[in-house]
Amino acid sequence: MTMRHCDVWALLVSPGGYVSMAVEGKAGEPFASTLEDWLKEASDGKRERLDFLCRTLQIPPNPAPDLRYQLFHRTASAILEAQRVRAPLAVMMIQSFREDQQSWLDYAAFASLLGAAAVRGGVAKARRSGDEQLFLGWVDCALASDSEIASAV
C-alpha cells in the first residue's frame, strides 16, 4: 500500500519524534463507497485487502458494512508510512472545505470504531497497541478566493 491515494502525505517533526500524516481533503463529497458497496462481487484479493487493513488498524475483521472504505485505507496508509520511516506517531487528518453532515457522521462512526472521540477542529488519540500511536483529526477550512491565494505568494 502506498500514499499515492492520499491528497497529502507529510513527514513532520514534533517533540515526540517524527509524525506520519495523511491528509484527505473534502469539499462536500462523500468518502467514496461504503464497505458494503466496495465488497459487492468482491474478489479474494479485495477481501484479503480489507483483512489486511483491519489488522493494520487493530480492529476485528468484518466491520460494519456502512463504514467508508476510504477512511480505512487513508488511516492504514498513515500507519504503514509511520512504520516505514520508524515514526512513533501517525495522524489521519480530514480537511473539510465545505459543510457535509454525512461525511462528518461517517468520520465519527469510523473514529468510534478505533476508540477515538470525533473532534471537530482537533485531533483525538485512537486505541492502539504497538510502536505507533494513532491520532485522527478533522478541521474545517473556508475555501480561499483567488485574490487571497495571490496575496499569499
Image: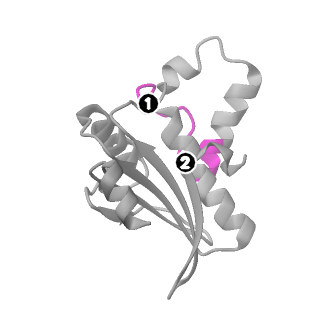
Q: 58 above or below 98?
A: below
Residue 19, percent from left and from top: 56, 72
Residue appearing at x 39%, y 66% in the figure: 152
Q: Secondary structure at mark 1?
A: loop
Q: Give the residue number, with chain letter if any, for mark 1.
A: 64
Which residue occupies 58% across, 13% down? 40
Q: Which mark is residue 39?
A: none
The residue tagged 2 is 7
Residue at the (27%, 57%) spot, across then down: 119
- The relative height of residue 89 versus residue 46 in the rendered view (above or below) is below
Residues packed near mark 2 inside 10 Å, few (<14), some (14 to 19) or many (20 plus): some
| In the image, farthest residue toward the top | 41
Residue 84: quadrant of the picture? bottom right
Position in image of residue 134 (x %, y %): 50, 64
**Residue closer to the observer: 138 or 147:** 147
Question: Which stretch did the figure color magenta?
Answer: 53-67
Dot 1 surroundings within 10 Å: few (below 14), some, or many (20 or more)? few
Does the stretch in magenta take in 105?
no
